[in-house]
Amino acid sequence: MREKLRKLGLDLPLLPTTAVGSYPKPEQLVEARRMMLAGRLKPKDLREMEERATKEWIALQEEIGLDVLVDGEMYRGDMATYFAENLEGFKISGLVRSYGNRYYRKPIIVGEVRWRGPITVDWWKFAQALTKKPIKGMITGPYTMMDWSFNEYYSSRKDACLDLAKALHQEVRALAEAGAKIIQIDEPALSTRPEELEEFVVDALEIVTRGVDAYFIAHVCYGAFEFIYPQMLELPVDNFDLEMSNSELDLVELFRRHPFTKDISFGVVDVHSHVIESVDLIKKRIRRALEVLSPEQLWIDPDCGLKTRTREEAIGKLQAMVKAVEEIRASLREG
Amino acid sequence: MELLTANTGSYPRIGDKPEQQKHRQAYARWEKGEISDEEFMRVQDEVTKEVIQEQVRAGLDLVTDGQVRWYDPISHIARRLKGFEIDGLLRFFDTNFYFRQPVVEGEVRWIGPILVEEFSFAKGVSPVPVKPVVTGPYTIARSSINRHYSDIEGLVLDLANAIGREIGELEKVGAEIVQVDEPAILKNPQDLELLRNAIEEMREHFKSASLALYTYFGDAAGIYEKLQELPVDIIGLDFTYSGNLVDIIEEKGSSKGLGLGLIDGRNTRMEKEAEVLPTLERIIPHVEGRPVYLNPSCGLEHLPRETAFAKLKNLVAIANKAREVLG
């Protein structure tokens, strides 16, 4: 797919480094969001703080040396709720428990899902104006939006998913028109009901991406993609971003049996652990990937968004990752 | 026609009203060490009582304690058995709920009552019968990492022994019906014989209590006839995954009592009488076994509290209408 990247005008080094999406929010921003929700802070003031935090993460990513940057999602709460709040057809539910003493509010589809206008485009433009490196456009995919929402309107999961796909297609088009060349579709729920992949998920992603000239990445976390592999390769995207460091899966075996035919963003640092991986450990993981993947199809990133880590942990993990990639690149050049 | 109404298991422990926050607040304070175990227990007692009253207010004939004290359906049982350690979070079937995964480090054994106190408390505060709910040996085994047994059979049978003993204790304190949840069998129908052996092992440990085997989060149509052959008294079925379960019951009938999960316990959409009644009219004449329950397809904790209550009220209204129509 390097040809496609070149055609889009993207000249990326071998083993491009990137991040998955979210970074930790500064404490003041977390507090400010709380105050805004309680009606004690103006949206305009919150926006200013979000912009400041975004600027800081763009600068940090440049300093660390990532090749493809993300805006850090300083303006998002939950990845599904954020889109639900900005699309037509949704309400937000009362509290539901996710585990232990953690509760969240879940989107409810109450009417026909429709795109009202750009959701993430302003933030993409804001972030892209701060750097020469490409910024990924980021959307939560139709399958995950459907699976993570209650559905009071559509008669089936398929119908809900396909309408979401139509709405999100417009967002993707708007991102591409604004200049986004790499667009990531977050589908952490993808392996939830494996039989649905062929029933309608392939169609849904075809609707999302159809006719849009961009390099598409599908982000699938929570391991478990072995249940949908190799069928998953039918999805119309260029790159799969997979959680690998936190997976007990024997990839080498799996990819030997069914070669991976797309590009892959290979997660090499665990986002659930406080421990910063050593450069050697990360290099070992990359070398293992290179046993079954060619360097031309390999991107390197963390397993998932880093928002649950501290700022220092997130930076430490990315620095170790970039250093490991630089050393591997050098050894590849030497042959 | 004797159609009863029941809850299937969990019930939301907090709601969106200010007075419905106490469980969450007490939990947070207990985690920080600001309140004692006893104090947290007292709050859990209070909330258990409230969720039972709420189920009674909705009009149910058979309630549960809402599993208010459970961290999750798997680790709540496993952590009180010998042989288990408790590990990290894992997704609970295809829901957006996470459980702590048990790790089997040694021989699994029952070492003392797990649910007896919870059940006795619930029974003591409920004006209507209470049904204890236990996660079954097969589902616990499938949800665990096995580092001790050479195969799953050994683990399942030792778990069946332990859970059978627990049911024996529940029976001693007055449980007349015990629900054993085995959602995992729907994804692993090849293990039905193993499930049968596990149920036979469990049955060694109690006498007269009715055993209700509940399945959910999957389509039971393909194994419906096999489920009918198991040594259980009642079978719980989730209709939200299946296109033809109703046809199969209509055709094959049921020699056992049934728990009809026709009310979706995972979606906020309210069922319409006109959708559920015709299904009941089709199924009920073919069911010889007793009792027949109308219940949610699964525990209600996947819904907001307000919606859970509305679902139960709706369920009772539909059952009342069905009794009228079916005579």
Image: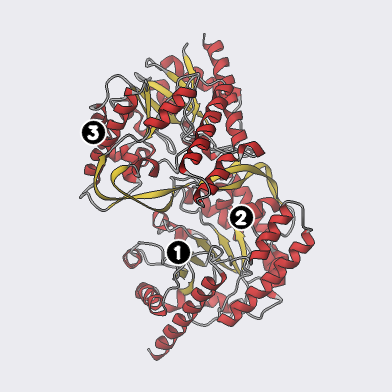
User: In the rendered image of this protein, does residue A3 appear above or below residue B19?
Assistant: below
Q: Quadrant of residue A135?
A: bottom right
Q: Chain of mark 1?
A: A
Residue linked to disc 3: B197
Q: Which residue is mark 1?
A: A243
Q: Secondary structure at mark 1?
A: loop
Q: Amino acid at mark 1?
A: Glu
Q: Element at badge 2?
A: loop
- Structural distance between the alpha carbons of marks 2 and 3: 45 Å
Q: Is residue B142 left or right of A210 when viewed as pictured?
A: left
Residue that badge 2 annotates:
A78
Horizontal side of B305 relative to A177 (left or right) equals left
Name the residue located 23 percent from the left edge and 27 percent from the top edge: B204
Relative to A115, residue B244 above or below: above
Q: Kindly report the distance in space between the C-alpha atoms of the residues bearing marks 1 and 2.
A: 20 Å
The chain that hosts pointer 2 is A
Residue A206 falls left or right of residue B230:
right
Q: Position of residue A63 (x, y in %)?
A: 59, 82
Q: Position of residue B84 (x, y in %)?
A: 30, 48
Mark 1 surroundings: few (<14), some (14-19) or many (≥20) residues within 10 A: many
Q: Are marks 3 and 1 in contact (CB under 8 Å)?
A: no
Going by the picture, which residue comes out furthest to the bottom?
A334
Look at 51% across and 79% down and name the residue there: A319
Q: Which residue is more in the foreground, B117 or A67?
A: B117
Going from N to C along the chain, the mark reached first, 1 or 2, is 2
How many numbered callouts? Answer: 3
Whether tag 1 and tag 2 are in contact, CB under 8 A, the answer is no
The disc placed on residue A67 is none
Secondary element under disc 3, as helix, strand or loop, is helix
Q: Amino acid at mark 3?
A: Asn
Give how far across and how far down residue B178 sits, in percent: 37, 26
Identify whether A321 is placed above or below B297: below
